[in-house]
Image: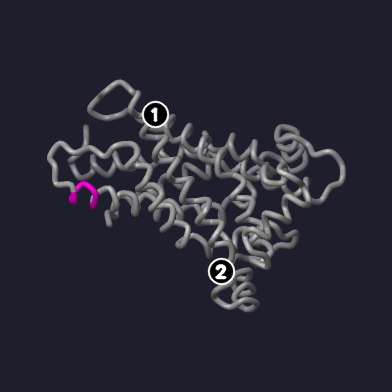
Amino acid sequence: MDPRETVSGMAGAVCCISAGQPFDVVKARLQAAQRSSSGPAIGPIACAIRTVKGEGVGGLFKGFHPALVSSMTENVVVWTVNSFLRAKLEDHVEEDDFEIEKHQHAMLGALTGAVSAVCICPAEVVKVRQQTRTTRSSVVGVAREIVGQSGPGGLFHGLGPLLLRDIPFYFLFFGAMEAYLEHVPASSTPSLLHSAVSGGLAGSFAWAVVFPLDVLKTRQQVYAGSQSVLGTLRSILADDGIKGLYRGWAPAVLRGFPANGALVFGVHTSRLCIERLEGTGPS
């Protein structure tokens, strides 16, 4: 494992949450309003304006610290594991001019997603339980409650849907990034701007496709896996129809561009800084 990728993943997580948290807050509030209100649902822009009017700009950054911890955990795993898998593939091929193709990047992304899902599941369960409560509760308090009610296995409720979400998400994310970069004019080092745009477009595209699986994951984690994945899906469809699988879709997809663009920008900027400190990068 390369510790430089670990540091880069942490830097990317800070950039990701800083850029994407307002969208995440709006998404969460839209979902809560749609589930609890019998009146017409408001749109994401109206929700954001209402939040700022009632709570100030800081209202759009509520839950920043738990989100940052969760994002750091995920991105440290994702970028460290993905770098490790790429290095193993290159070592296995043993060709001097070998370059990983975009479909191989996508497959490595899928493997990365499987590892990431297992590692972040406990943090995801705690985060989702905390976000859906109306009373204040600490991260440690929520974790203790889950373990007390369901044992250690309670921290892995919803792992199935999480795997179903993250494997295709990272397949699409890494594959789409490479597909974009293939169309960038050849240069010795892709610019940070192109890297950020590739991450943003890939993030929005991946979220647009996998979002229904995220709804399934959240429902399972909130209700402690009381139903099977298929049972949860049937329940959502029976209550709300297909639209129930797309609550909060618009802010999630909109968030994908700035959040994932900032993530990739942070990762690549951190890599460049580390290379310069080591004397191996461009001056």
Based on the displayed image, in which of its 4 quarters is residue 195 positioned?
Answer: top left
- Does 279 lie within the magenta span? no
Q: Who's the residue at 26% across and 23% down the image? A: 186
- Main SS, magenta region, reads helix
Badge 2 or badge 1: first in the primary sequence: 2
Position above or below: 31 against 186: below
Residue 55 rendering spot, x and y as whole percentages: 74, 43
Q: Is 12 situated left or right of 258 in this image?
A: left
Q: Which residues are the magenta region?
A: 88-92
- Which secondary structure, mark 2? helix
Residue type indicated by callout 1: Tyr
Image quadrant holding the N terminus, namely bottom left
Residue that carries the numbered disc 2 in the rendered image: 155
Q: Who's the residue at 22% across and 37% down the image? A: 99
Based on the displayed image, in which of its 4 quarters is residue 101 positioned?
Answer: top left
Image quadrant holding the C terminus, namely top left
Residue 80 rendering spot, x and y as whole percentages: 34, 53
Residue 26 rendering spot, x and y as whole percentages: 68, 42
Position above or below: 227 against 45: below
Residue type indicated by callout 2: Leu
Position above or below: 109 against 179: below
Based on the displayed image, in which of its 4 quarters is residue 225 positioned?
Answer: bottom right
- Which secondary structure, mark 1? helix
